[in-house]
Amino acid sequence: MEDLKKMYDAILNGNFKAAREITQQALAAGVDPQVLVQEQMIPAMDEVGRRYEANEYFVPELLISARAMKASLEFIRPLLTARGAEPAGRVVIGTVKGDLHDIGKNLVAAMLEGAGFEVIDLGVDVSPEKFITALNERHAGLIAMSALLTTTMNSMKTTVEALKAAGVRNKVKIMIGGAPVTQKYADEIGADGYSNNANAAVALARKLVAA
Ligand code: B12
């Protein structure tokens, strides 16, 4: 298929039906899925993130672009996995114990996936033990924790401590976020990074994985 730029536009405009159709057509026409991801989809999500930071896009636009990205990745992911393509990094993400808010966490997960990370999403109400088990089983290099309640933030600290107690703290980078979380809190609990939005979370993840 000659006009792959349509894929870029579908994601930028949050048109998930078009994203799905174009993906199917492109793959049927023999387009390399890696090319589709690297040259169209990731740049489109990067542009979504840029517009969000520039206050040109807001949370609803982020959500619909993320949905379009996901719709396309459903077809592409199995092909990349079968081929053994190396992800940008492997991230275990979850909303911490006691907390059921997942809109921000899902956005961060989708943006990371859009940026080429393999994302293992543990969902909500994730205990420190569950984070550690997933980290060990999936050999992730990064843990991303989200909390929206001042009462559940403390579970981030508990998880960092549990990672230390399990002897795996030095094997993983930790990033945290969510409305009540701050850089100061990240420093206090010994996390490696904090960001206050999904786009900055991608830049942070890239930086932590490269470090
Ligand atoms: C939607 C919502 C709900 C929904 C959640 C639905 C869902 N599936 O998520 C429902 C109705 C279930 C809910 C329940 C409750 N909620 Co509520 N909820 C909200 C609300 C309105 C929006 C949150 C949201 O989705 N924001 C949009 C997302 C995109 O933003 P975000 O989460 O901050 O994420 C961004 C960044 O923070 C960052 N980020 C997020 N996670 C991560 C992770 C990493 C690693 C990184 C790097 C970055 C990052 O990137 C994201 C994208 O840019 C907020 C109010 C508000 N305006 O924040 C209250 C709010 C969070 N809720 C609140 C409360 C009190 C509750 C309840 C206790 C209410 C009750 N009495 O039952 C329950 C708790 C349930 C539980 N155990 O978790 C309070 C919390 C107060 C506090 N200081 O603790 C708030 C602030 C409302 C208020 N003003 O009182 N809630």
Image (cartoon, rainbow, N blue to C red):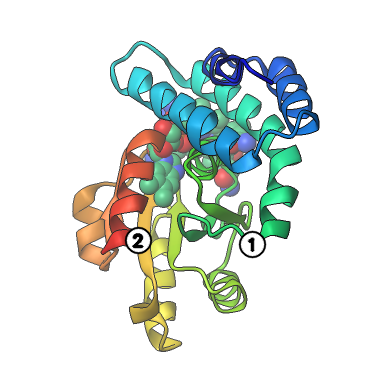
26 w.r.t. 15: above or below? below
Quarter residue 188 falls in: bottom left
Where is residue 125 drawn, in percent x and y? 60, 56
Which comes sooner in the sequence, label 2 or label 1? Answer: 1
Kind of residue indicated by mark 1? Gly
Q: Is residue 148 visible?
A: no
Nearest the eye: 207 or 81: 81
Task: State the count of labels.
Answer: 2
Kindly identify which residue carries mark 2: 209
At 26% from the left and 57% from the top, the residue drawn is: 186
Where is residue 97 drawn, in percent x and y? 55, 60
At 55% from the left and 14% from the top, the residue drawn is: 9
Q: Which mark is residue 14?
A: none
175 w.r.t. 9: above or below? below
State how far apart marks 2 and 1 are (Cα): 19 Å
Q: Which mark is residue 84?
A: 1
At 47% from the left and 42% from the top, the residue drawn is: 115
At 53% from the left and 60% from the top, the residue drawn is: 86
Nearest the eye: 131 or 79: 79
- Quadrant containing the N terminus is top right
Where is residue 150 drawn, in percent x and y? 39, 48
- Quadrant containing the C terminus is bottom left
Dot 1 beta carbon under 8 Å from ligand 1: no
Where is residue 136 drawn, in percent x and y? 56, 79
21 w.r.t. 208: above or below? above
Q: Nearer the viewer, mark 2 or mark 1?
A: 1
Kind of residue indicated by mark 2? Val
